[in-house]
Amino acid sequence: MFKPLEFFIGLRYTRSKHKNHYISFISLASMLGIMIGVLALITVLSVMNGFEKELRTRILGMVAHVTVSGTDGKLSDWQAVDEKLTADTTVAGVAPYIQQQVMLSANGEIRGIMMQGIQPERQSAVSELDLNMVEGSLSTLKDREYGIAIGSELASSIGAYLGDKVTVITPNARVTPAGVLPRMKRFTVTAIYKMNMRDYDSSTAFIHLSDAARLFKMKDQVSGLRLRLDDLFDAQPKAVALQKEMGEAVQVSDWGKDNKTFFSAIRMEKTMMFFILLLIVVVAAFNLVSSLVMVVNDKQADIAILRTLGISPKSIKKIFMIQGSIIGVSGAILGAIGGVLLAGNLDTIIPALEDFFGAKIFPEEIFYISQVPSDLQMPDVWLITIAALVMAVVATIYPANRAAAVQPAESLRYE
């Protein structure tokens, strides 16, 4: 009367109270192991996705999506290229820049930095620098006034703050009666920014494009043009297309290529964490195998009776596969639900835990990212859940084959 019969019996075996409570405990432990493994995987990958997204956002706050530069560090006739790129409908913003390594000196302290000449009125179209000003603004960088914007960490390290004078020493030397001397120029700190990225806050400074052209003797040339696209993930194909269109006279790169090592390390770390945490599910699957083997040994008499009633070995195999699959599916589904709920509410759970214990997980004075970011991506959830389901089903094959191989006469001999 019950169809399918294998599902009904497998469900009964799952719901029934075993005489051997140890078997029930192992089955429960297997389900909890799968659940915890899936929950941990979803949560950890969501946090890693959140960190990657946060770092990418901060990096792209300073770095353009696509950069068009001269092969020798100088881009001639850049105005024509600028007009052409500005007319492109896929390009949201274009800004020229001049870039050179210099030494910055103040209060007896010297630091090597990357000096960038920019047009303040156009810089906001390709970066978020103006939105991260602690003091002053980019509008204070004016032609021939020799103002400079420096990072907060650089300001602290050399003791230079708003209104202070700093000396820029360029690698371009000049010949004088006293000998060969480096070119030096005094600048006034008119703005201080904080991007919460050490590479930029401690080693990058900005001046007006015209001041940079005079300082580095660039005349009417620039180092290149920075582009911001409507979609940052179109940067690579756009860079390839521009390189083909403009030829070998220029060099075109995208943000992924410029930061390839950094993002490759993040992806590798994410992949390794996936496989490491997946071992929790693998261990739970092994527990499921052992619990089902013990169930098969405990139910040999039942199996023999079912065989004498006419049930085929194939059906016996299905019974125990169904029983194990129910445990695995329950653990995977509960883990997925718990993982989605936990990952989706970390922004409220973590602050609550920090308030309860009175300690910060990521102190602001040590870490740039003081909050625990979470970016829940459903493809990750589906991948983890399906992987757990597959392992749970595979774990039932060996015990189910043992159950199908039980000989009725041998099992009932001493009953």
Image (cartoon, rainbow, N blue to C red):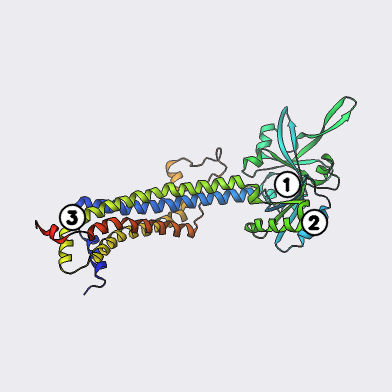
The residue at the far bottom in this view is 1
| Residue 142 visible in this rendered orientation of the protein | no
Q: Nearer the viewer, residue 258 or 243?
A: 243
Q: Earlier in the sequence, mark 3 or mark 2?
A: 2
Q: Amino acid at mark 1?
A: Ser
Residue 29 screen position, x and y as percent: 29, 51
Task: Answer yes or no: is residue 230 visible.
Answer: yes
| Residue 148 versus residue 65 in the image, above or below | above
Q: CA distance from mark 1 to mark 2?
A: 28 Å
- Which element is circle 3 on? helix
Q: Which mark is residue 81?
A: 2
Residue 215 image label: none
Amino acid type, residue under disc 2 in the picture: Val
Q: Secondary structure at mark 2?
A: helix
Residue 236 picture quarter? bottom right
Task: Tell me how far mark 3 sits from mark 2, CA to CA.
Answer: 80 Å
Q: Residue at x 66, y 34 (%)?
A: 156
Which quadrant would the C terminus be assigned to in this image?
Answer: bottom left
Q: Which residue is mark 3?
A: 298
Task: Give the amino acid type for the residue marked by disc 3 in the picture.
Answer: Asp
Q: Which label lies toward us, 3 or 2?
A: 3
> In the depicted view, which residue is nearer to us: 306 or 202?
306
Label 1 or label 2, whichever comes before in sequence order: 2
Q: Position of residue 113 (x, y in %)?
A: 71, 37
Q: Quote the CA–CA distance across marks 1 and 3.
A: 77 Å
Task: Name the one closer to the observer, 248 or 278.
Answer: 248
Q: Residue furthest left?
A: 414
**What numbered label is drawn on residue 137?**
1
